[in-house]
Amino acid sequence: MTALEGRSALVTGAASGIGLATAKILAARGARVMLSDINAEAVASAAEAIREMGGEAAAVKCDIGDERQIRDSVARTVEAFGRLDILHNNAALVRPDISAADTDILEVPIEVWDAVMNVTLRGTMLGCKFGIEAMLGNGGGSIINTSSMYGVSPPLLMPSYCVSKAGINMLTRHVATTFGRKGIRCNAVAPGLVRTPAADAIIPRPFAEVHENASALAHQSTPEDIAHVVAFLASDDSRSMTGEILHVDGGTTSHLATYAQARGLGG
C-alpha cells in the first residue's frame, strides 16, 4: 500500500457514499483532501470528521452542474494545499425524482435527459478540464472518474444515467490518451450496486436483491471497497495504468445473463 504523503486531492460528491469513503481513505494514507459537495453543511461536517481523525481536510460547496463552481473548487484546492495531484470526479445527478422519470427513451422527459447530461457527464468533463490545468502546473497527477456497470452493460431502464456513464468511459480514455505524455493518468471505476444512501433512495429493495443474486461474489460491495480501488489508482502502485475502466462490481458483468438461474440449478 503506497502512502500519499505530500499529495493533494479533490473529491467531488464527498459528503456521503463512495466520495466520503474515498476522502477518508486518501486522508488516512497521508493526502491532504478537499471535499466538495452540493450539500455545504454535510460536506463541512465530513471534513471536520476527517480532521478529528488526524487527517488534513477542508470543504467547499460545489454543484458540478455549474462551471464556475467546479473551477473555483479546483482553485480552492490549489490555494489551500499548494497543488492538485489527485482528482476523484465522483459526483453525479442521482435523485429519486430524476431516477423515477428516467424510464426509457420513449418516455423520459427531455429536461431530465438534459439535466443528467449537464451534471453527470458535463460536470465530469469540466472537472477533468480544470483539474488538468492545475495538474500541468505541477508536472502531472492522477484523475479517477466514477463510472458504473450501467455505463458498460445497460439495465432495462435509466437510459440517461447509462449514456452519461458510458460517456464518462470514453472521456476517461480520451484524457488518458491526450495527456499521458504530460504526466497525467486518467482511469475510471465502474461499480456495481453499492449500498449508499443515494442508492437506497432510488433502487427498490426487490430490484436490489436481483442485483445481489447476479453478483459472482457472495458479499455486496461497500463504499469502502470502491474507495480502496480509487486510492490504488491515485497512487504510484498504478503508475503504468491509464485509460482503464476497472469493473468493481462483484463480477456482475463478468458472466452470462443466465448465471443466477444456472447457479440455482447447480450448473
Image (tube, rainbow, N blue to C red):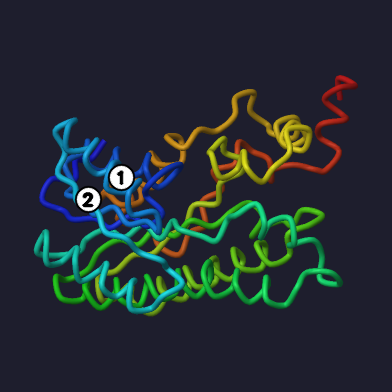
Residue found 90% across the figure and 21% down from its top: 265
| Left or right placement of residue 211 versus residue 181 in this view | right
Disc 2 to disc 1, how far (Cα)?
6 Å
| Of callouts 2 and 1, the N-terminal one | 1
Name the residue tied to disc 2: 33
Q: Is residue 241 visible?
A: no
Tell me: residue 67, above or below residue 44: below
Q: Observer-nearest residue: 78 or 76? A: 76
Mark sitting on residue 23: 1
Residue found 38% across the figure and 78% down from its top: 67
Q: Observer-nearest residue: 157 or 262? A: 157
Residue 191, horizontal then vertical, whole percent? 56, 46
| Left or right placement of residue 58 versus residue 121 in this view | left
The amino acid type of the residue labelled 1 equals: Ala
Q: Residues within 10 Å of mark 2 (few under 14, many from 20)?
A: many
Residue found 75% across the figure and 61% down from its top: 101
Question: Is label 2 in contact with label 1 (beta carbons under 8 Å)?
Answer: yes
**Secondary element at image label 1:** helix
Which image quarter: residue 195? Answer: top right
**Image quarter in which the N terminus is found:** top left
Which image quarter: residue 208? Answer: top right
Number of disc labels: 2
The amino acid type of the residue labelled 2 equals: Val
Q: Observer-nearest residue: 186 or 47? A: 47
Residue most toward the right? 265
Residue 46, horizontal then vertical, whole percent? 30, 41
Residue 244, horizontal then vertical, whole percent? 48, 59
